[in-house]
Image (tube, grey):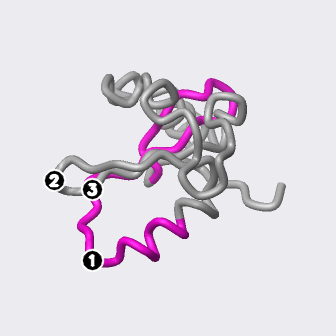
Amino acid sequence: MKLLTALLSAALIFPATAAHAADDNKEIPACQYCGMDRDQFGQTRMLIEYEGGSKIGVCSIHDAGVDLAQSISKTISRIMTADYNSRKLIDAQKATWVLGG
């Protein structure tokens, strides 16, 4: 149990949160799909980066799914999501997800 707690804690506060993603709300202030303010609702935002350097910022996992479905021909480089408490972006594959909470 202590090991699981330590691993989850490390995943949520890991300092390599991508320096270029730190200002994602300034670079992409609103969700492309619904217009929601990504700073105001920063605890649910996501950043999807594709090969070639294109990226999109969305407000939720729903709108991330919309973008991924519409971008099926693109190769994903990385998907980041916000840690709910700190609002810092973390690797979505390392995140613990709670849906419908």
Answer whether labels 1 and 2 touch (C-beta < 8 Å): no
Q: Earlier in the sequence, mark 1 or mark 3?
A: 3
Q: Is residue 74 left or right of residue 90?
A: left
Image quadrant in which the C terminus is located: bottom right
Q: Residues within 10 Å of mark 2 (few under 14, many from 20)?
A: few
Disc number placed over residue 50 in the picture, else none: 3
Residue at disc 3, secondary structure: strand
**Magenta region, residue range:** 65-92
**Residue receiving disc 1:** 73
Q: Residue at x 63, y 52 (%)?
A: 60
In percent of the image, x 25 and y 55: which residue is there? 77
Give 87 or 94, whichever is nearer the viewer. 87
Viewer-proximal residue among 83 and 63 = 63
Cβ–Cβ under 8 Å for marks 3 and 2? yes
Task: Using the numbered discs, state the Cα–Cα distance from disc 1 to disc 2 in whole angstroms.
Answer: 13 Å
Q: Is residue 94 magenta?
A: no
- Is 54 on the left-hand or right-hand side of 84? left
Query: Could you tell me which residue is drawn at 62 percent across and 47 percent down?
Result: 59
Question: Circle 2 is placed at which residue position?
Answer: 52
Give the percent coordinates (x, y) of residue 39.
63, 29
Q: Position of residue 6 (x, y in %)?
A: 54, 33
Q: Tag 3: residue type?
A: Tyr
Q: Residues within 10 Å of mark 1 (few under 14, many from 20)?
A: few
